[in-house]
Amino acid sequence: MLIRPFDPSDTETVIALWNACGLVRPWNDPLTDIQRKLTVQPELFLVGVDEETPGGEVVGSVMVGFDGHRGWVNYLAVSPEHRGHGHGRAFMAEAERLLISIGCPKLNLQVRAGNEGVLAFYEALGYAPDHTVSLGKRLIAD
């Protein structure tokens, strides 16, 4: 898998990927999320392509961000057909590398409650619960 920056031509494929991975929720319009990301640090929106397929099929994605205090990872996805080959680890390694290169001291991420498989994935990469409570407030209804 080759990791490269997202290109707007990837939009429909990435949305289909997120749907296939169960990341889309009714309160988050994926197209709107992509459009918003392209206005803030678009170079930190990455896709992974399978170099062995014609045209390089998009098989994964990750949105990375840095607010000057903490880094964040959102929409880490690897297509179900391409899991188990280290692609998720490769995305996280690249996210960490990019964040370190811009001076980010700590990376945060959120995992939905009950998603034990994903929790185990991140724990294997050295992530641990911060014992905090994540709060949110919708400012713009999508």
Image (cartoon, grey):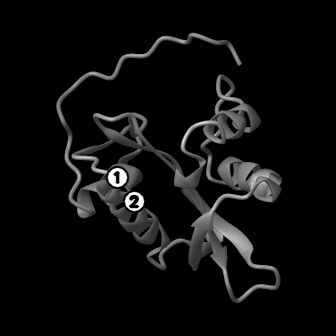
Q: Which residue position is annotated with label 2?
A: 98
Q: Is residue 38 or residue 26 the one in the foreground?
A: 38
Left or right: 43 in relation to 130: right
Q: Quadrant of the N terminus?
A: bottom right
Q: On the image, numbered disc 1 is attached to which residue? A: 102
Cα separation, mark 2 vs mark 1, equals: 7 Å
Q: At numbered mark 1, what does the secondary structure look like: helix, strand or loop?
A: loop
Q: Is residue 142 above or below residue 7?
A: above
**In the image, residue 30 lies at what x, y percent?**
71, 37
- Residue 133 placement (x, y as % from top left): 27, 21
Give the left or right position of residue 11, taking residue 116 as reference.
Answer: right
Residue sitting at 33 percent across and 50 percent down? 119
Q: Closer to us: mark 2 or mark 1?
A: 1
Name the residue rendered at 55%, 12% in the picture.
138
Who is closer to the viewer here, 54 or 84? 54
Mark 2 crowd level (few <14, some 14–19, many ≥20, 10 Å Cα): some
